[in-house]
Image (spheres, coloured by chain):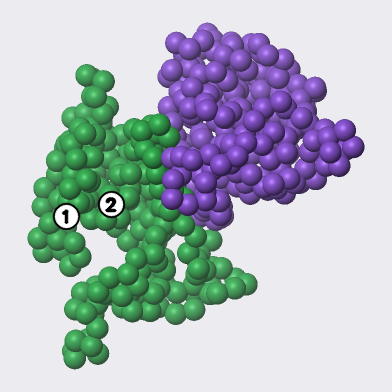
Chain colours: A purple, B green
Amino acid sequence: MRAEGAWASLAKWRNELYPIYAPTGDPTRVVAMVERASSYNFGIRTYGVHINGFVNGADGMRRMWVGKRAATKQTWPGYLDQIVAGGIGNGMGVEESVIKECYEEGGIPESIARGARAAGMIQYFTQSELGLQPETEYVYDLELPLDFVPKPTDGEVEEFYLWTMDQVVDNVRKNLFKPNCAVCVVDFLIRHGYLTPENEPDYIEIIQNVHSPLPFPGPK
Amino acid sequence: MRAEGAWASLAKWRNELYPIYAPTGDPTRVVAMVERASSYNFGIRTYGVHINGFVNGADGMRRMWVGKRAATKQTWPGYLDQIVAGGIGNGMGVEESVIKECYEEGGIPESIARGARAAGMIQYFTQSELGLQPETEYVYDLELPLDFVPKPTDGEVEEFYLWTMDQVVDNVRKNLFKPNCAVCVVDFLIRHGYLTPENEPDYIEIIQNVHSPLPFPGPK
């Protein structure tokens, strides 16, 4: 099917296996494995980690590191992204994925990456030309040292920018972020008091919608 | 009906009117007002603010202020609560309610209360002997000065405790918190990295469930 181009998704073959969890009873039981690229065709639930990397300046100003995805990325090339984000591969733990992706995508050493703090998750179910994608992204916040500069080590990021929160919001509004990365930014803005019940009329709806339950079993 | 004791809820008469919002079209339109105590009988959606008051000690230890509800409170007397929490009355803004409740319940002056930072909302639909309660609680975090000591000014709180996060969790586990206050503590533990995908098997389910959509219109 891949050779015949039967599904658009298969053109983005990853050589990476994703687990399908058992529907009931034992939530730790993996019933099958599928190539990551084909998960879209079966609507397989997938998981990832997104790390909000920021600095609190001596001037009292908070700035966020933003990555620009390489032009060669199979999905959303050239779009803006968190400093570090990635899918959780089979058998990988959540924090293990945070440490691994921090090093691979941003050149962040483990000594700094260990400071990443779990801060929740966002969840959504999207449909695209590739198929169906019910996904959970574990969200982490990582305050970086003022003198740290991330560097791409695996070629997945073209460039990093250190932006004020206003610049970040401006780029979210212009739809220059990969959509799920934009949702992570919005979640950050809510948790840190930039978006409030007073300045955002859809405050409740946004918070509900970015934590929607998915109708499939997951791991424990 | 109040005189006849027709509904258990009416014994807890508040002399306070709550708004019912229009179902469609104009979300700012209030279609009727009901006595707060009877909102349970009609399943009227209600709103409140909960403020997590904490200090970051010089010893690196975070401690949280916890209130013990007065024995004379009409609901959940003697249970543990946030340092400040209260319902949003008709016509009150969210931040206005934060400032008002901070002063009335904890003797927190406006100069300090203005430091409260919006951090999201929790939402739930409960049923009790009083009736049905679909409720949204706007959640705020307030870092307090180390030398500040809250004091009850309106008699709604019997006593305040300054506890380590371990002591707070211990009391949540013992069901000594009013249930929605316990949910606010859990939300705080998630947002600040005490509960993580690694140490809490129900991490995803908890985050989904405390942000459940309610099947009724609300204000904008």
Where does residue B72 sit, x and y in percent of width and height?
Answer: 11, 64
- Farthest residue toward the front? A31
Across the whole image, how many numbered discs are drawn on residues?
A: 2
Displayed quadrant of residue A123: top right
> Which element type, helix, strand or loop, lies under badge 2?
helix
Q: How dense is the environment of label 1, judged by Cα within 10 Å: few (below 14), some, or many (20 and up)?
A: some
Where does residue A151 sit, x and y in percent of width and height?
Answer: 64, 11
Q: Residue at x 41, y 52 (%)?
A: B210
Q: How dense is the environment of label 2, judged by Cα within 10 Å: few (below 14), some, or many (20 and up)?
A: many
Quadrant location of the C terminus of chain A?
top left
Vertical comparison of A96 with B159: above or below: above
- Residue B78 visible (yes or no): yes
Vertical comparison of B34 with A169: above or below: below
**Mark 1 residue type:** Tyr
Q: Residue at x 49, y 22 (%)?
A: A96
Quadrant location of the N terminus of chain A?
top right
Where does residue B216 sit, x and y in percent of width and height?
Answer: 50, 70
Which chain's residue wears label 1? B
Q: Mark 2 near mark 1, Cβ–Cβ under 8 Å?
A: yes
Vertical comparison of A126 with A75: above or below: below
Displayed quadrant of residue A215: bottom right
* Left or right of residue A153, residue B110 in this image: left
Q: Which residue is mark 1?
A: B79
Q: Residue at x 72, y 15 (%)?
A: A155
> Which element type, helix, strand or loop, lies under badge 1?
loop
Which chain's residue wears label 2? B
| Mark 2 vs mark 1, CA separation in Å | 10 Å
- Farthest residue toward the right? A4
What numbered label is drawn on residue B181?
Answer: 2
**First reached walking from the N terminus: tag 2 or tag 1:** 1
